[in-house]
Amino acid sequence: MDYFSRFANKSVLITGGLGFIGSNLAHRLVELKARVTLLDSMVPDHGGNLHNLDGIQDAVTVNFSDVRDPHALRYLIPNFDFLFNMAGQVSHRDSMEKPLIDLEINVASQLSLLESCRRLNPEIRIVFASTRQFYGRVKHLPVSEEHPISPTDVNGVNKMAAEWYHLIYHNVYGLRTTALRLSNIYGPRQLLRHSRQGFISGFIRLALQGRSIQIYGDGNQLRDLTHVDDVVDAFLRAASAGAVGKVYNVGANQAYRLSEIADTVNEVAGNKSPVEFVPFPEEYKKIDIGDFATDFSKICRELSWFPKMELRPGLGQTINFYRKNLEHYLGPEQ
Amino acid sequence: MDYFSRFANKSVLITGGLGFIGSNLAHRLVELKARVTLLDSMVPDHGGNLHNLDGIQDAVTVNFSDVRDPHALRYLIPNFDFLFNMAGQVSHRDSMEKPLIDLEINVASQLSLLESCRRLNPEIRIVFASTRQFYGRVKHLPVSEEHPISPTDVNGVNKMAAEWYHLIYHNVYGLRTTALRLSNIYGPRQLLRHSRQGFISGFIRLALQGRSIQIYGDGNQLRDLTHVDDVVDAFLRAASAGAVGKVYNVGANQAYRLSEIADTVNEVAGNKSPVEFVPFPEEYKKIDIGDFATDFSKICRELSWFPKMELRPGLGQTINFYRKNLEHYLGPEQ
């Protein structure tokens, strides 16, 4: 499927547009000659970063506001052909410490956004950044979309609810929504400052600092890591296809053990400090999902998507990016 | 299991305590010599009714406040041994018209309530009124707890999220929660004024008024109706058992077609007006779940619960109640 020409001169809104995936998508959409508006709340530590627009500052419009603000959204929504709905609180641990904040950002604002779309712009094409997190502790690997759902934390419940809203607004109102359940993602423009948005950013930060990567437990948990360029490709394919009212897994070809991933990060970064295995903190252990590997055959079959970037070259490209831009992604330790 | 003595002198809080199930539970708990406090917001048309306390006014404490009010809850929660968590917005149609209100009542307030419990009274025993609604359009009958979840409307998503919160607060914090997924329920003390909380109250109202019962569609949809006394029994069994962190279906022995249920209601009430079949309104059709019948073998096996009231005698008792108390349940037409 060639979607390259599909976005030229189209008006595109990206919520969470200054964040990790949103900004990478913005770079690609600028190449594809779309008219791109980025909405971001710039909540500290959530991932929004002005440096993520380096090179495209003059080609995009930035609207600083929060998805929790229904008034700004009602004003913006009528103007767009596409909505890439990336805004969210992604830390599982934070969702347990501040569950009502997670609920506001990941559920209430999503419902408000969908209400605005159905009332003010029912033709808009929406792709929602969902997560594989709410499969929970899985029964078998790899995990397809048919696997039972069993969230282990408040964030999982909330993202699941938001995904269902997208599907219900399609079923009941005909809104043209698609949800992508994303696995762990790595690549340029990710928040490195803390590890609450996923282990990989912590691994990369520590390796670049020449410090020991710490792994909770024995390091045997399986995870699949998708490069953000592949994730961007999935969003663009979903938005330009007729895949409305559908849910797709997006993940990597191969799952690796955390200890293998840490070793690879160290090798690629030239870090000589050995990996350290430390006991699982109680509050993480209770919400950990164990092993994961993605069955992405549905999106492969229906949207011809498959992950092109292998882990080692992907980590090489990623670590090169951070070496050049480290000060913008490595703020004070949390 | 004999739970009769289990509640004597125990402090019990019922949210939604002036509503249909809550007030029936209160009557039973007063018989069992519990110290009962009822929390109710008295939101118009949600089911709260002072007449529901007829006969037990002096034996219970009423606290008028809203589960959305975290301050009142924080003050109340430390005082109780048991929490029967019944408060909710139950209209599916209303959840589509005012989705953010449904979210506040059914999700945000539940999360706030659980936070209060874990912080202020971690030993409290909680039973949550969940629903079979979020099984959605089911794949096979009867439906067990293992059936995949697929909500068809915002209310279904929200109740599902609230149920998951109860389970996660058990898994992560050890809160002693149980959820009962209730099927359609009938009996004394239900709001008859409108039909948005379930078809059966509308059937009973129209039959008592000698008017035609209207059925959407061909009347062939299967539904199982559980008498509220059986539901109360399920709540008491769940609360006095060790069934923490678990979910149970609660439903009837037999499912009937809507047209059969309407005929039976008319017969029992002596209503001569014929049943009318009318086209499904578009907004109901989109969220209708089709046939349903409950597999309640899990609660039967684990808590020795089974529904004792058959439909015809149950309807007889129910209609007798409303004949005597009609003015309190039949306000202005909506």
Image: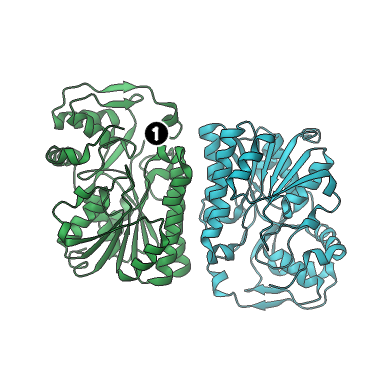
Chain colours: A cyan, B green
**Apparent side of residue A24 relative to residue B231 in the rendered image (left or right):** right
Task: Residue B80 in the image: state x and y as whole percent.
Answer: 30, 68
Question: Within the image, what quadrant is residue A121 found in?
Answer: top right
Task: Residue B206 in the image: state x and y as whole percent.
Answer: 22, 29
User: Is residue A155 depicted above or below B227 in this figure?
Assistant: below
Amino acid type of the residue that numbered disc 1 sits on in the rendered structure: Gly
Q: Quadrant of the C terminus of chain B?
A: top left
Residue A135 in view of the camera: no
Question: Within the image, what quadrant is residue A285 found in?
Answer: bottom right
Seen at 57% across and 49% down, the residue is A109
Residue B249 in view of the camera: yes
Q: Quadrant of the N terminus of chain B?
A: bottom left
**Apparent side of residue A15 relative to residue A287 in the rendered image (left or right):** right
Task: Residue A265 in the image: state x and y as whole percent.
Answer: 78, 67
**Apparent side of residue B313 relative to residue A131 in the rendered image (left or right):** left
Q: Which residue is mark 1?
A: B290
Question: Within the image, what quadrant is residue B270 found in?
Answer: top left
Chain name for mark 1: B
The residue lying toward the viewer, choosing from A239 and A119, is A119
